[in-house]
Image (cartoon, rainbow, N blue to C red):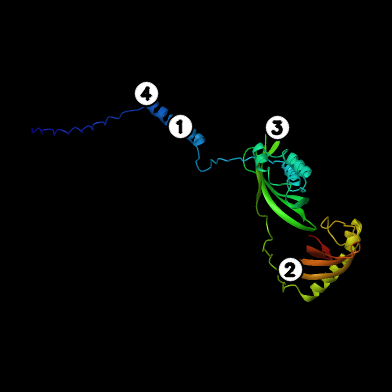
Amino acid sequence: MIFKKKEKKEKPVKEKKVSVMKVGTHKKTVIALWLVLIASVSFGVYKNFTAIDMHTVHEKEVIEQHIIDTNRIENFVKGFAKSYHAWSNTQESIDARTAAISNYLTKGLQDLNTDTVRKDIPTSSTVTNVQIWNVEQTKANDFTAIYSVDQTVTEGDQSKQYTSAYEVVVHADDNGNMVITKNPTICSLPTKSSYEPKTQEVDVNVDAATIEEVTEFLETFFKLYPTATEKELSYYVAGNVLEPVNTDYVFSELVNPVFTQDGDNIKVSVSVSYLDQRTKATQISQFDLVLEKTDSNWKIVG
């Protein structure tokens, strides 16, 4: 009897389990991380709302303008000029002038002007007009005034007209009292400017038929205009573009009208010649008008 030896079965090798660290929400490290995250987000939101945008911050400097009433200074200078530039060659007149200008000048300027007019001068002067051209504040209480004076100067049997310009400085104290601190000093006045406005050019887009219509309308209107009532004007003018003038003028002619197309409207620059019945002189008025055509009628709308 033969006995077979049993083969040993190999036991399966057990796999080693990998250690896994389980992190639960109750761990202190997780709580700390959550706190850091919340703090970071909160700080970011805070910075977003409180950050200063350097590009949108603007500083504005507000400059207050003070309107200065110069009427009293102008009247003061006019009163002075009428006394200073007028005299006659008598001791009585010279004394009166000296007393008058002492009400305007500082003591130093009174002394400076002691001998400006003497009894032995051969002329006398009367002031026909004083005009103030400019008053400018130069210091807190000082004002520079430029004025012109028209004088009639008589020497013997001859009289001549002169116009001269001067500059003075007026000191006005806090109580409103004034004194001249600079003697009348010769200066210049503005002269005529060489400026000439650009001449309007004829618009070739305005056809001959339209020009004829508008010209006829304007002639009719300007014949009526000087004496027209508000109701009569309403047929020719929209709103208050032209108000009643109620003058005794007689229409003569349109002078050099220039027509320009402005969309559906027509712009007209025109001089209107009238005869003034009161003075018998010709009066020329200049108008810049905008005309609109409604249905078959023209109307002044601007």
Give the image location of residue 262, x and y in percent.
73, 66
Q: Nearer the viewer, residue 160 or 175?
A: 160
2 vs 1, front mark: 2
First-in-chain label (4 vs 2):
4
Which quadrant is the C terminus positioned in?
bottom right
State if disc 3 and disc 4 touch (CB < 8 Å): no
First-in-chain label (1 vs 3):
1
Which labelled disc corresponds to residue 261?
2
Whole-number angstrom distance, CA of label 1 to CA of label 3? 62 Å
2 vs 3, front mark: 3
1 vs 3, front mark: 3
4 vs 3, front mark: 3
4 vs 2, front mark: 2
Which labelled disc corresponds to residue 28?
4
Q: Amino acid at mark 3?
A: Asn
Q: Where does label 3 land, which residue?
A: 175
Question: At 44% from the left edge and 29% from the top edge, which residue is drawn?
Answer: 39
Q: Amino acid at mark 4?
A: Lys
Whole-number angstrom distance, CA of label 4 to CA of label 2? 87 Å
